[in-house]
Image (cartoon, helix red, strand yellow):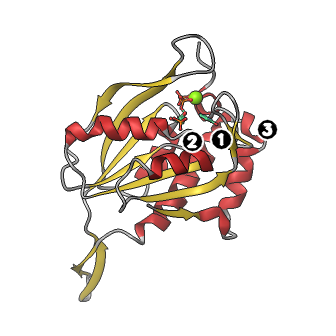
Amino acid sequence: MTIHHLAKHNSVLNTFLQEIRDHKIQQDSMRFRRNIERIGEILSYEMSKELSYASKEITTVLGTKQADLIDDSLVICSILRAGLPLHRGILNYFDAAENAFISAYRYHPNNDDEFEIKVEYFASPSIDGKTLILADPMLATGQSLVSVYEAIQKFGTPKKIVLVSVIGAQEGIDYIQNHFPENTDLWIADVDDTLNEKGYIVPGLGDAGDLSFGSKL
Ligand SMILES: O=P(O)(O)OC[C@H]1O[C@H](OP(=O)(O)OP(=O)(O)O)[C@H](O)[C@@H]1O
Ligand SMILES: O=c1cc[nH]c(=O)[nH]1
Ligand SMILES: [Mg+2]
């Protein structure tokens, strides 16, 4: 797996990251969602440089011009709920992409810190031969991404998988590296060192789903 860690290089991305992490600024949920969306746009732009391109002739009012345009059939698949603002940011840049949505949540069978991932709702086009963009803002243990990858295989075999995330823990990145094909690319804004006992990224930002949409029962 190739890991593209964008915050290693100075850019305006770091402003948006600082705002989603800051415990006061992040309370403005509209700003939080919009910042996740803006980060999705930046990740998309960077990631687009490594897609496949084909030359096409464009006709202007005065002549013709050859242009290299994206040649991949893209399917953006995001994980509910927290994936929604990130999905929107990616779709803002890839107008022709198809879309898939999946639900994944942490189920605590014994009401303690131990959990397993339940994948239930799934709406997806065929992903056969396409470039699958799997988007989730938080890559904590990595179990959600791996569970979704296993579940989506019944919709076909993608040509390539591109993972897009905002903040990841090194432990989760190590985990997904062992579960995704070698030619998978991970485009991630920032990487933190640790997870706490509840599987939250530290320092991270807290719960991205709650910050976007409010707490759930
Ligand atoms: O890498 P993992 O350890 O699997 O954790 C990451 C998952 O946790 C978050 O979802 P959450 O379960 O909080 O659901 P939500 O989006 O509904 O809040 C996040 O959006 C990921 O899907
Ligand atoms: O740190 C984390 C881990 C899982 N889900 C989140 O929203 N945040
Ligand atoms: Mg959550």
Q: Tell me which residue sits at (21%, 37%) in the image.
A: 154
Q: Amino acid at mark 3?
A: His
Residue beneath label 3, please? 23
**Within 8 Å of ligand 1, the CB of disc 2?**
yes
Percent position of residue 135, x then y: 45, 46
Please identify the quadrant where the C terminus is shown: top right
Q: CA distance from mark 3 to mark 2?
A: 16 Å
The image's mark for residue 138 is 2
Find residue 149 and report its image quarter. top left
Judging depth in this view, the residue of 92 and 17 nearest the camera is: 17
Residue beneath label 1, please? 32
Judging depth in this view, the residue of 115 and 163 nearest the camera is: 115
Provide the secondary structure element on which disc 2 rests. Answer: strand
Judging depth in this view, the residue of 22 and 194 nearest the camera is: 194
One can see residue 169 in this view: no
Q: Residues within 10 Å of mark 1 (few under 14, many from 20)?
A: many
Please identify, in this view, whether the residue under mark 1 or under mark 2 is nearer the observer.
2
